[in-house]
Image (cartoon, rainbow, N blue to C red):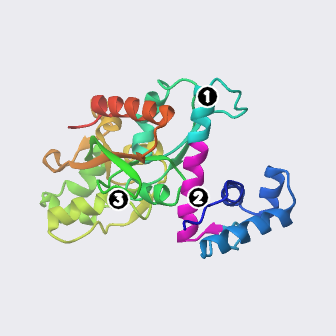
């Protein structure tokens, strides 16, 4: 006999995760903290699993992530059904999407404007890590570098984002203009990285040197737009998306250090397998925008 998951308990677990504490969830659901605690405990007993880590803020366990993902999918389906029936939902249609910073700064946002009546909650995350947010049930869709589908998700290829090794001309003359091969001088030059998970610059130097990473001193600039400005200001060299590099190339603020060594990062759209009109509409406009902006 299959054990059912009572919907009030499932929704309560989601509220606790979203609000961060039992007290905040109680306020959001207009019940007492004791009622919240009892529902969560009952759901844990029913599933035979610990679903929440009682930290501040609370965090779902691996089993809890499964239930949270189910709760978000259920909420999405219920809202879509009420909307199609013409019922007053009292709730704005909302989609949560994880997207990497460079896509967010270039081609991604104009696509969302093509989906009327939907409000978006965007989570900025490195393309190598956006699938974790899908797996945890935090988002319904993600732009990711992984072609391997998260359980319960479909995958669609978007294209490749091309990065060019760029620097200010004066920086290039100072650090790379001594006549040595680029494979020798580039690893010793200061470099700009987005954050400590940004591996693009090291990928290029490892490719040039067959193993050596960028080691000439590192600047960390965790903003896509500010990253490009930092490279243009001469702080260091860095891998810049083509769309952001083009205006700087035209006015001579940046130069391409190695045109033959561009790095292409494949991007994919992963989303929950839900029959959701809002999610389907978002997927179509994102795929169309990617087709126009990314390398095939």
Answer with mark 2 or mark 1, whichever residue precedes in sequence.
2
Could you tell me which residue is drawn at 44 percent across and 38 percent down? Answer: 105
Could you tell me which residue is drawn at 85 percent across and 66 percent down? Answer: 34
Q: Residues within 10 Å of mark 3 (few under 14, many from 20)?
A: many
Please provide percent x and percent y for residue 263: 22, 50
Q: Which residue is mark 1?
A: 83
Is 16 placed left or right of 122 in the picture? right
**Nearest to viewer (mark 3 / mark 2):** 2
Q: Is residue 186 above or below residue 282?
A: below
Residue placed most toward the observer, 257 or 211: 211
Q: Which residue is mark 2?
A: 68
Could you tell me which residue is drawn at 28 percent across and 36 percent down? Answer: 294
Please provide percent x and percent y for residue 12: 72, 57
Q: Main secondary structure of the magenta part?
A: helix
Q: Quadrant of the N terminus?
A: bottom right
Q: Which residue is mark 3?
A: 191
The magenta stretch spans which residues? 59-76
Q: Quadrant of residue 256?
A: top left
Q: Is residue 74 magenta?
A: yes
């Amino acid at each position: 006999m299959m054990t059912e998951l009572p919907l009030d308990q499932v929704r309560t677990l989601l509220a606790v995760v979203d609000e961060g504490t039992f007290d905040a969830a109680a306020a959001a659901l207009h019940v007492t903290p004791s009622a919240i605690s009892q529902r969560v405990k009952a759901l844990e007993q029913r599933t035979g699993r610990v679903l929440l880590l009682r930290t501040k803020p609370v965090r779902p366990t691996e089993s809890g992530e499964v239930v949270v993902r189910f709760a978000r999918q259920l909420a999405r389906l219920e809202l879509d059904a009420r909307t199609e029936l013409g019922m007053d939902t009292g709730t704005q249609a909302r989609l949560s999407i994880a997207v990497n910073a460079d896509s967010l700064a270039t081609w991604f946002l104009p696509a969302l404007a093509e989906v009327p009546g939907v409000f978006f909650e965007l989570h900025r995350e490195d393309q190598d890590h956006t699938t974790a947010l899908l797996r945890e049930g935090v988002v319904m869709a993600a732009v990711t570098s992984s072609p391997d589908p998260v359980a319960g998700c479909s995958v669609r290829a978007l294209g490749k984002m091309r990065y060019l090794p760029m620097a200010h001309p004066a920086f290039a003359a100072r650090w790379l203009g001594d006549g040595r091969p680029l494979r020798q001088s580039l690893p010793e030059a200061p470099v700009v990285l987005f954050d400590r998970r940004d591996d693009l610059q090291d990928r290029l130097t490892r490719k040039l040197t067959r193993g050596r990473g960028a080691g000439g001193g590192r600047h960390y600039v965790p903003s896509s737009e500010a990253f490009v400005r930092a490279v243009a200001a001469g702080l260091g060299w860095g891998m810049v998306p083509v769309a952001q590099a083009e205006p700087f190339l035209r006015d001579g603020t940046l130069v391409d250090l190695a045109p033959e060594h561009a790095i292409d990062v494949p991007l994919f759209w992963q989303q929950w397998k839900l029959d959701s009109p809002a999610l389907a509409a978002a997927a179509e406009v994102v795929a169309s925008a990617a087709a126009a902006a990314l390398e095939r």
